[in-house]
Image (tube, rainbow, N blue to C red):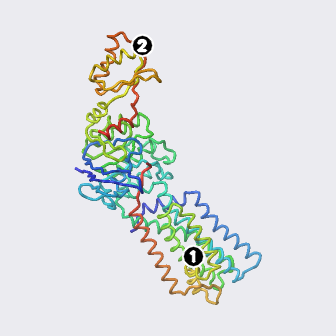
Amino acid sequence: MTTLHIDHVSRWFGNVVAVNDVSMTVGPGVTGLLGPNGAGKSTLINMMGGFLDPSTGAVTLDGRTIWRNESVYRDIGVVPEREAMYDFLTGREFVVANAELQGLGAKEAQRALATVEMEYAQDRKVSTYSKGMRQRVKMASALVHDPSVLLLDEPFNGMDPRQRMQLMDLLRRMGADGRTVLFSSHILEEVEQLASHIEVIVAGRHAASGDFRKIRRLMTDRPHRYLVRSSDDRALAAALIADPSTAGIEVDHADGGLRIQAVDFGRFTELLPKVARERGIRLLTVSPSDESLESVFSYLVAA
Amino acid sequence: MYNPTVARLTYRALLGRRRALILFLLPAMLLVISAAIRVLNGADDQAASDVLGGFALATMVPLIGVIAGTGAIGPEIDDGSIVYLLSKPVKRPTIIFTKLIVAIAVTMAFSAVPTLIAGFILNGNGQQVAVAYTVAALVASITYSALFLLLGTVSRHAVVIGLVYALVWETLFGSLIAGARTLSVQQWALALAEKVTGDGLVTSDVGLTTAVVLLVAVTVTATWFAGQKLRRLTLAGEE
């Protein structure tokens, strides 16, 4: 049982604060580190992987400091986001080299290549690989020593749906085996499909933590904004504002429509068509106006 | 202290790049020039010393040192692939020491060996000129490799800085300002060459003891510092 502890960790680069007073505990199972691009996910993973020292706070693995401690790599496997590998090697040579650096050999390398199903292309040069193939060989290099902790930075980037499913299966299996698997992603659906536990990072801050249902609820319970156009905007507005699921309605003359702020997402989505039907109002446009992930995230930070 | 896997990766990275062409080009030039002089002038001790001192030791050895020394680590740090070495239970100074050995071996192979051959072509090792400059090239290879390996660890512009040092400092200032010569790997190496030839064919501005002390001190300090630097190396993400 291996646990990563992040204790009041901040990291800044010059004047820029990349990670701001984050505390979290990552234990066995699959944890998703979710956040928009530039939120500080990579910085956090780099600190967990020992490639960056925290400006303040401590990052430890079962009580052992990770920074400047090479021995932790017997327990940690790292899959970096960056593409660069030793492109002049074949996939097999690359994984064998990684195994040797762990004090292991060709047998373990072969097993890792089989785990990621890359045996069929193992004798091709890495430089000829697609992004998904590179990702899998990187995975193999991180798995050679059967680590109890696996850190992956944006592992699904550039993978096609089939490769994505394969990798998800693999990570799920590793989590079920009791390994501590942490991966970062900026895509909610990815995290939701795979992670039993989610940590949300926004603008360097720890915005939320919990299982995906809790995070999903946090995200859907926030006030939603809609632009609605109908055959009779004012009649519709009067009927909607009478219900507590709606917090505010504005008649937008410029765009020609209603700007509605709903506070109870579930109830509002049932109410709107019902009200329209009862009053004989035709709905012409119903479009959410702030469904971007960034707005979801920024709501979480404020909450 | 020496990791064969790190060494293998470093050799393949060094000799597999396009830059490696310069490693073959410079020695080839030296041999062609030497052959031409021998054919046109016949064997001449002074000419041999001029070519080996002026081109081999002053230009070729430091340039090959720059390519091998910075190339042994710089590109890996630049593109981030060093992460595969750093994420292993291998001591960081071991990585540096191994890369130093590889850089020294490559520099010696591509500078000292051609120097010896060129010396024999020029005057058949008369007055021990060939051996003297080969000894100088061998020791200079060690110190240049250590210096430029450190440079590759601390700066992204290692090749440029290395070239400026090798060409401007060692060659230009060295010939203009007497003081600069004391702080020149080339002069330290020449002090050893001077000991081998005798007869005033090779002269150095630095005494033998001073030269040896400085060669050892610079090599050891640069290597130690590079090891420390690698321990503290941070890999910022792409954000």
* Residue nearest the viewer, comparing B154 with B189: B154
Q: Quadrant of residue A98?
A: bottom left
Mark sitting on residue A231: 2
Q: Position of residue A29 (x, y in %)?
A: 26, 43
A148 left or right of B7 in image? left
Q: Chain of mark 1?
A: B
Can the viewer see residue A111?
Answer: no
Q: Is residue B33 left or right of residue B155?
A: right
Q: Is residue B145 visible?
A: yes
Q: Quadrant of residue B186?
A: bottom right
The residue beneath circle 1 is: B137
Who is closer to the viewer here, B144 or A299?
A: A299
Q: Residue, x 75% and y 75% (percent of image)?
A: B39
Q: Which quadrant of the structure image shows residue A167?
A: top left
The one of B44 and A62 positioned closer to us in this rendering: A62
User: Looking at this view, is A19 or B218 the one in front?
Assistant: A19
Please report the residue visible at 58 percent of the width from the left and 79 percent of the height from the top.
B180
Seen in the picture, residue B236 relative to B119 is either above or below; the reply is: above
Q: Is residue B226 above or below residue A202?
A: below
- CA separation, marks 1 and 2? 90 Å
Say which residue appears at 26% left-offset and 38% top-offset: A211
